[in-house]
Image (tube, grey):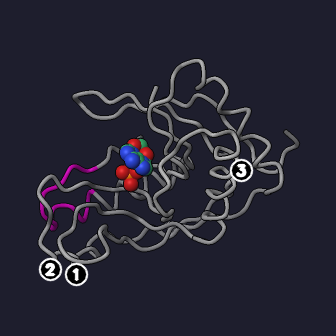
């Protein structure tokens, strides 16, 4: 199974993002826009994990979250990957980036300690909004403000271990486990 750990966005924020995207995308180049129900912030991507081992992932991660209580997350401005040049991915930032990064580090450290492999790309707190099949010209960066950042905040109280099922019609995500912040493991 293909696994990742992510922050689920509250429905209200997902709706607000979906509205901002619906209004802005008509004035942006074509891209594959993420369906509202699939919007999330990935903390760590494990990739393919054998089924017996997958069952052991949540118990590895839980203790890592015991020492970190809930905190408030707010939506920020849209941005793009890569940093410069033609645009491949459009995302919405979430803040505070430092607290989210620290949360990702906790999860990664717990996986490392158990020799569970994961994608060790540097963490960037982003919610992917769109992937360009053909990269947008660099000049399109200036138009990212056509997606009006929804100003919302929410209490981050849990992270979710997701299974990702890649289908021809798009990825389908299924929550396998919910891991609460700041609870004794
Ligand atoms: P992305 O949104 O920046 O593409 C499910 O694929 C989630 O895992 C997505 O949020 C994706 O991030 C993230 N992810 C991180 N590393 C990945 C990788 N190497 N391959 C696929 N998805 C990855």
From which residue to which does the magenta span run? 22-33
Front label number (3 vs 2): 2
Toward the viewer: 45 or 92?
A: 45
CA distance separating discs 3 and 2: 38 Å
Which residue lies at the image location 25% right of the left edge and 54% below the top edge? Answer: 131
Which residue lies at the image location 74% right of the left edge and 32% below the top edge? Answer: 59
Instruction: Answer left or right for 128 relative to 66.
Output: left
User: Could you tell me residue 164's position as x and y percent?
Assistant: 42, 32
Q: Which residue is mark 1?
A: 142
CA distance separating discs 1 and 2: 6 Å
Q: Which residue is mark 2?
A: 139
Q: Which residue is mark 3?
A: 157
Q: Secondary structure at mark 2?
A: helix
Q: Secondary structure at mark 3?
A: loop
Q: Is residue 83 magenta?
A: no
Q: Is residue 56 visible?
A: yes
Q: Is residue 39 visible?
A: no
Instruction: Answer left or right for 108 relative to 34.
Output: right
Q: Secondary structure at mark 1?
A: helix
Label 3 Cα neighbours within 10 Å, binned few <14 / some 14-19 / many ≥20: some
Q: Quadrant of residue 16?
A: bottom left
Chain-order first, disc 1 or disc 3: 1
Instruction: Answer left or right for 37 relative to 53.
Output: left
Relative vertical location of residue 155 with respect to residue 168 in this rendering, above or below: below
Q: Are marks 1 and 2 in contact (CB under 8 Å)?
A: yes
Which residue lies at the image location 57% right of the left edge and 70% below the top edge? Answer: 95
């Amino acid at each position: 199974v293909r696994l990742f750990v992510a922050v689920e966005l509250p429905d209200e924020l997902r709706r607000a993002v979906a509205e901002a995207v619906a209004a802005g995308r008509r004035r942006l180049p074509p891209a594959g826009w993420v369906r509202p129900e699939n919007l999330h912030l990935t903390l760590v991507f494990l990739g393919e994990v054998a089924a017996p081992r997958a069952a052991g992932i949540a118990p590895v991660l839980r203790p890592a979250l015991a020492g970190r209580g809930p905190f408030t997350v707010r939506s920020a401005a849209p941005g793009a990957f890569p940093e410069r040049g033609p645009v491949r991915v459009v995302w919405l930032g979430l803040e505070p980036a430092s607290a989210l990064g620290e949360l990702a580090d906790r999860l990664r450290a717990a996986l490392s300690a158990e020799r569970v492999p994961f994608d060790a790309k540097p963490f960037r707190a982003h919610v992917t909004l769109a992937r360009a099949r053909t990269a947008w010209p660099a000049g399109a960066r200036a138009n990212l403000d056509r997606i009006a950042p929804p100003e919302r905040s929410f209490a981050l109280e849990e992270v979710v271990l997701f299974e990702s099922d890649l289908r021809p019609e798009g990825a389908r995500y299924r929550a396998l486990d919910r891991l609460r912040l700041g609870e004794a493991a």
